[in-house]
Structures are given as structure tokens and as C-alpha cells.
Amino acid sequence: METHKWLDKYNAIWLSVPAYHDLTPENKLYEEVSQWNRKEMKEMSRYMLGVVTHSLQGGSPAQHPIFNRAIQCARALLEFYRYAPYKSHDDATLSYMEDALRPFHTFKDVFILGRAGKQAKAKANALRTDLVKKRQGDEETNAETRTPSKKWREMNAWRDYISHEIDVPQQPDAVFNFPKIHMMSHLVGKTNPYGAVQQYSAERYKEAHKMNLKDGWTASNHNLNSLPQVITFQRHILCFEMRKLNLQAVAKRRENSAAACNVPPSSADLAAPLSSRHMGSPKSWDPKTAVMESILTL
Amino acid sequence: MTIRNLSSKIRLMPSTHSVIMVALLLIPIKNSNGPKRQLDEQQQTNQEVLNEVLRRVLQPLTYKNNPSAESWYYNVLCADGNFRHCQPVLAAWLAECPEDGDLQFLEQHVSFWCECPMNVLGHYVPPDKQHTRWNHNLYRTLSDANTKAGDAELSSRHVRQVLNVFGHIPCIMSDLTKPDLLHTMQIGMLGHLQK
């Protein structure tokens, strides 16, 4: 978007996405978000293809094939992502993932400018500066002889020419050889022996960082010996919860035994002599009292 | 740390305390603007600290402390006071790419699931034509041999020569790292797409 000077349009469409049901779009400009978290990424993946497709409508004839490739690449990656977190997979869903991954690799070259290294970017910027100076010189020379419409056409032609020229030196330095893009090709193969990928997601462990570490640090005395306190904090909470569950189980067991004692007497029992009967009603049993008793006995 | 034979529904629920902290790694200094030599030294120190922490955590499971571990079982004291033959298997390690590389003692910017050359990492690889997996038994043999040819072989395969605690417990190291959805797709590829 930035290369083709369409970032403003993209931002406007980005902000115009309405909230719907459980979807809460971003209320900031795309450039203003410094770091994306997991939930934002998940929600963004639901409407990003629509935003990209709508943003890339129009443009010059030279830009149409580039924009189409960009849309197809984004669609393939988002499709792959939407299949990946399934809780269970079969051969059909795995084949859908493979089918989505193939076009992504076919069309990913359209984003090669985004992978440009520092040296390639510096070269491209220098070349852009030279070409813009050359264009300005050409405009000044022929300013009097050209009509406004011809000036407009010349401007568009120059813009396409500059975009094409600065692509060339960046390509040898800009490649997609980084591990994460290769790991996608292993996701399908790893699902067969180890099950759905979602159970191995590190989201839960990221959340546990707050519960295990930050809460422990808040509860500690922040002194030199605070680290052991942080480590044992969650263990203490866990011990109390286990004790609570044990007591609830004991109370439930006693409740069941008390209910068994409350069986109404049969006619044979009532016919028996009074002296042989059990005197007095069974003691009424209260679960709260039982829990307190069990706490005192433990 | 968590337990494998929990259902994913229970394990992914924060209120079930299915993830327990067993150790706290020191927080390394983050100074990316320093000289390269200093950064390399810091990185080396971080890796050594990680290895030492893992060694201390996993020490009770090593062959040295548990001779029966050679047969992949341990005599474990259970909650009812009885000892039982158990087979605990260290099954998964979830982290970002650099930490997975540290775990397997691989160089940076390589795939930690297969010996894919670095210059073709971005190419599409069909499932039936995947590259060979990392053979850590071979690397341990080459490292123990301590010969020039072995060192050259390890360097060509982007493997570092460091004592690895996972070589002393019953586990298959190349199976430890599992596909991490968060770092591979959500923060990883979707982040790249946004940029």
C-alpha cells in the first residue's frame, strides 16, 4: 500500500469496518498500532481480506496484475490460517490446508518489497531520488508545450516507470528465506502424528505468565528474597484449591451416607417391639458443619 | 510444565491450573544497540543459563540418577505411598524460533524440524518431499568424537557443539518442538502479511 501510495485509502477502509456480533474492529489507524496481540490478530484475520480487496479496487492497468496477485496471496494465507486452529482434522481439511499453501507460495513474490533488506532499500531510495529529479527536469523542459491532460498521462507513466525501476535492484536482496515461512509446510505433516495444532499453541503459556509470575510478584514483599515467593505463590494457591476440593469430596461422601441412614422404616420394623427399635431420629446432617468438622479434624 | 494426557479443553482453560511454573529463568539484558561482540557474548551467556536451568530441572530424570531410565521407566512415589513403574516422557517444547534453536543447539535462522538449507527456506515443500529430520544421535556421536572432520560436519549442518542435557534423559529431541500456532501463524505469518 505504501509503495503504491494507497495507504490513506487502506486506512480509511480499515477504520470503516463496523462492529458486528463478537467482532470488535480496531478503532486506531493501522500505522498507529505498535504491537498486535493474539486476540487482535484473530479478529483482524476475519475482516482483513475484505479490507485488502476493497482497498485494491481501481488503479492503473499496470497495477491490476500486481493487486490481483496481492489479493490472491492474502486470501491463501488467511485461508490457511483459518483452517490451522481447527480442534480436529481429517484428510479433507488437511488437503484444504495444502491447497491453500500452494497458491500462497505462488503469489508471495508480490510482497517481495516488504522483505527488502537495508542495503536494498538504500539503493532503491537513491534510484528513486535520481528518477524523480529526472522527471522534474523533463516537466520543466516541456512545461509550455504540454496540455494538462497530457501532463497527467506523463505523470502516470513516470510513476509506473519509477515503480518498475526500483523493483529491480531490490529483488536479489529481498528473499523469503526465514524459518517461519518454512514451518507452515510442516504444520500439515505434524498434525497426523501429534493431533490438531491448536493444543500446542503457546497462547495458554503466555497467559500463564500473568498468573504465575506477575501476580506472584505483586503479592511478594519485593525484597531480595522475592523470587522464591514468586515461584511458590501459585503453588500455595493450588494447594488451597486442592484442599478445598478434597473437603468438598468428604462432605459429599458424608452427605450420601447420611441420606442412606434416612431411609423410612418398613412395616416389619414398625411391627417390632418398641424396645428393639432404634430410639430417636438420626441426627440431621449439615454439609457446612461437616466441612468445619473435617477442617478441625485434619 | 503441563501434563500431556489432559484433554486440550482442560489444559487450555486458565482456571484449571493446568500449567505450573517449575523454574524462573533470569531475564537477560536487552541492549540491541551495543557492539556486536557484546551482543554475541550476551547471547552465549543466555544460552548457557538456559542449559544450566534445564539441567537442574531435569537432573532427577537423568540416566546417572535413575539407571532404570535406560529402559524408559522410573520408580515413582505416588500419592498413596506406593512406588510404581511410570514412564514419564518429555513430550513438547513450545517457544519462539530462537528458543527452539537454543533447545536443539542449532544456529540461528535454520528450520528446527528438518535439515532444510537456509537458501531454500522460502520455497514450497510438499508433504511427501520434506527434508530429512535432525539426527541428534549422530550429532552427539560427532561431538563426542571431537575430531576435526566431526567438527566440520557439525558446522556444515549448522549444529553447535555444546553439552546438551536432553542427551542424558530418555526423550527424542527432534520430537520435542511442536508446531506453535501463536508464533508460527498469528504473530508470525499474519504479522509479516500486515507489514
Image (tube, coloured by chain):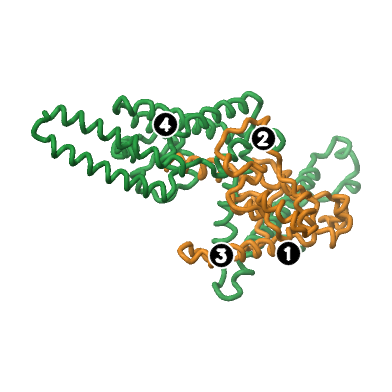
Residue A219 visible: yes
Chain containing mark 4: A
The chain holding disc 2 is B
For the residues beneath circles 1 and 4, the answer to whether they share a chain is no
Which numbered disc, 1 or 2, marks the residue that appears first in the sequence? 1
Residue B130: which disc? 2
Report the residue at 58% width, 49% height from top: B109
Query: Label 1 lies in what chain?
Result: B
Do the residues indicated by labels 3 and 1 lie within the same chain of the protein? Answer: yes
Q: Are marks 2 and 4 on the same chain?
A: no
Query: Of residues A273 and A122, which is closer to you in this image?
Result: A122
Residue lying at 62% horizontally and 43% vertically, measured from the top left: B117
Badge 4 amino acid: Ala
Q: Secondary structure at mark 2?
A: loop
Q: Which residue is mark 4?
A: A70
To which residue does mark 3 refer? B28
Q: For numbered disc 1, what is the local secondary structure?
A: helix
Tag 1 residue: B56
